[in-house]
């Protein structure tokens, strides 16, 4: 028996490597080979209702709302839910309405102690929508092109009730910016790949579409209204099926946003996001936990193997290089498509930092009290 004890660490390393290769080659590899559809001009596009929830977003509305209002699309409306703003958002919206008659507003008045979250604002936007097909984004976001709505709408084929889009962050100097964009890429890599495997578990509210009938059929956010976050990912997690989800990832459909610039603001933002993960379906929590655990376990075993059994260093080197090679072969084309190719050289470092960070944040989220939207 003792003769086999020295093989425990190498065997565990091999097990974690196998799990990682599954995620990389068989799950994420699906996104690598996916052929995204360009804009089609020979189809009938359904009328759309674009919903934007805004609280004290005067400056962002001035900067970005026109990008949404000037889409090359035959028939659509834009609904801005002005959620108890104390700035001049209301006057900015009135100015836009003079130029764009298809811009409509929903006003939420301050109810004092009765503090409603973003889900309430989204619900009012959906109720006020004229059309069946809804597209959601945020006030601090702007589409890359005027073809965004066409790219999203053309995915509403028969049976499709949800369309998942992609929303990268703008590039600037500094390590925090690099990490935020890498984390955003990793999140998109996961939810888009799983959607292609008919296992959709989340989407991002910066670029998301679904039908009004689905929203009301599933009673909106009723089952998780008590959770402040989750207006996007929890709604998808609970209502996505194997056959009602499509994705739209052509660059013409990307919706950009400016990331946080301080670690404090970024941590506060992630606190809100992690709060919703506790309510995911069990199979999705297991899937995400297994992936993170296998990454942490892989790196930990590499270190332990080199310290406790240094004669196995060739095995450790082969395992690390094999995993990294497979990751680069799969991820480089995807990173170029999702417009984060400048991060390719950062991949080895960001990989371990990312999974350590989300593991720690996930543990803290189990004990954190509720947080509010803005």
Image (cartoon, rainbow, N blue to C red):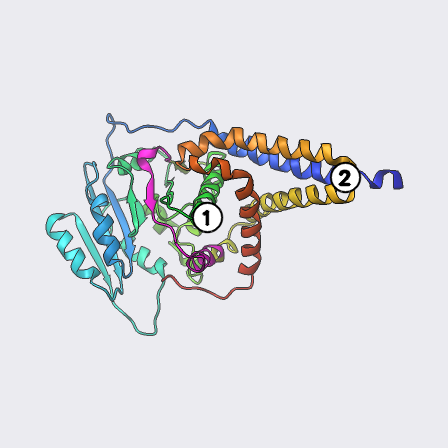
Q: Residues within 10 Å of mark 1 (few under 14, many from 20)?
A: few
Tell which of 73 and 143 is nearer to you. 143
What are the residue bounds of the magenta stretch?
Answer: 248-274
Q: Outermost residue toward the left? A: 98
> Against 227, is 202 above or below?
above
Quarter of the image with the N terminus is: top right
The percent position of residue 178, horizontal first and vertical second, equals: 44, 45
> Against 225, is 184 above or below?
above
To which residue does mark 2 refer? 310
| Magenta segment includes 254 | yes
The residue depicted at 32 percent of the width and 55 percent of the height is 122
Q: Secondary structure at mark 1?
A: helix
To which residue does mark 1 refer? 175
- Indicate which disc residue 240 carries: none
Of the residues under marks 1 and 2, which one precedes in the sequence?
Answer: 1
Q: Is residue 359 left or right of residue 112?
A: right
The residue depicted at 61 percent of the width and 43 percent of the height is 295
Q: Secondary structure at mark 2?
A: helix
The percent position of residue 21, horizontal first and vertical second, equals: 61, 33
The percent position of residue 359, horizontal first and vertical second, equals: 57, 52
> Against 18, is 179 above or below?
below
Q: Is residue 210 visible?
A: no
Tell which of 233 and 185 is nearer to you. 185
The residue depicted at 70 percent of the width and 39 percent of the height is 13
Q: Are marks 1 and 2 in contact (CB under 8 Å)?
A: no
State how far apart marks 1 and 2 are (Cα). Answer: 33 Å
């Amino acid at each position: 028996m003792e003769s086999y004890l020295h093989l425990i660490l190498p065997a565990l390393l091999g097990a974690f490597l196998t799990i990682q290769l599954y995620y990389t080659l068989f799950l994420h590899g699906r996104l690598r080979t996916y052929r995204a559809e360009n804009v089609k001009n020979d189809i009938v596009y359904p009328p759309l209702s674009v919903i934007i929830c805004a609280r004290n977003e005067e400056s962002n509305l001035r900067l970005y709302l026109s990008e949404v209002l000037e889409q090359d699309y035959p028939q659509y409306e834009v609904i801005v839910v002005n959620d108890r703003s104390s700035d001049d958002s209301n006057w900015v919206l009135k100015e836009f309405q003079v130029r764009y008659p298809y811009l409509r507003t929903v006003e939420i008045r301050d109810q004092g102690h009765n503090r409603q979250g973003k889900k309430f604002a989204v619900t009012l936007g959906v109720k006020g929508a004229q059309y069946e097909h809804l597209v959601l984004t945020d006030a601090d976001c702007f589409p890359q092109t005027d073809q965004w709505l066409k790219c999203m709408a053309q995915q509403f084929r028969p049976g499709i009730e949800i369309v998942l889009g992609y929303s990268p962050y703008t590039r600037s100097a500094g390590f925090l910016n690099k990490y935020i964009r890498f984390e955003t890429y990793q999140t998109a890599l996961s939810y888009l790949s799983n959607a292609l495997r008919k296992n959709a578990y989340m989407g991002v509210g910066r670029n998301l579409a679904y039908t009004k009938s689905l929203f009301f059929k599933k009673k909106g956010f009723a089952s998780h209204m008590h959770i402040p976050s989750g207006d996007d990912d929890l709604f998808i997690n609970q209502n996505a099926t194997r056959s009602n989800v499509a994705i739209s990832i052509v660059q013409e459909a990307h919706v950009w946003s400016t990331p946080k610039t301080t670690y404090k603001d970024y941590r506060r933002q992630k606190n809100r996001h992690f709060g919703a993960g506790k309510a995911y379906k069990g199979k999705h929590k297991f899937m995400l936990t297994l992936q993170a655990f296998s990454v942490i376990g892989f790196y930990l075993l590499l270190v332990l193997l080199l310290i406790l059994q240094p004669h196995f260093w060739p095995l450790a080197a082969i395992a690390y290089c094999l995993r990294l090679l497979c990751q680069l072969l799969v991820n480089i084309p995807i990173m170029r498509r999702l417009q984060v190719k400048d991060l390719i050289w950062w991949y080895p470092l960001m990989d371990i930092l990312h999974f350590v960070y989300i593991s720690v944040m996930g543990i803290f989220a189990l004990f954190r009290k509720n947080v509010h939207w803005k």
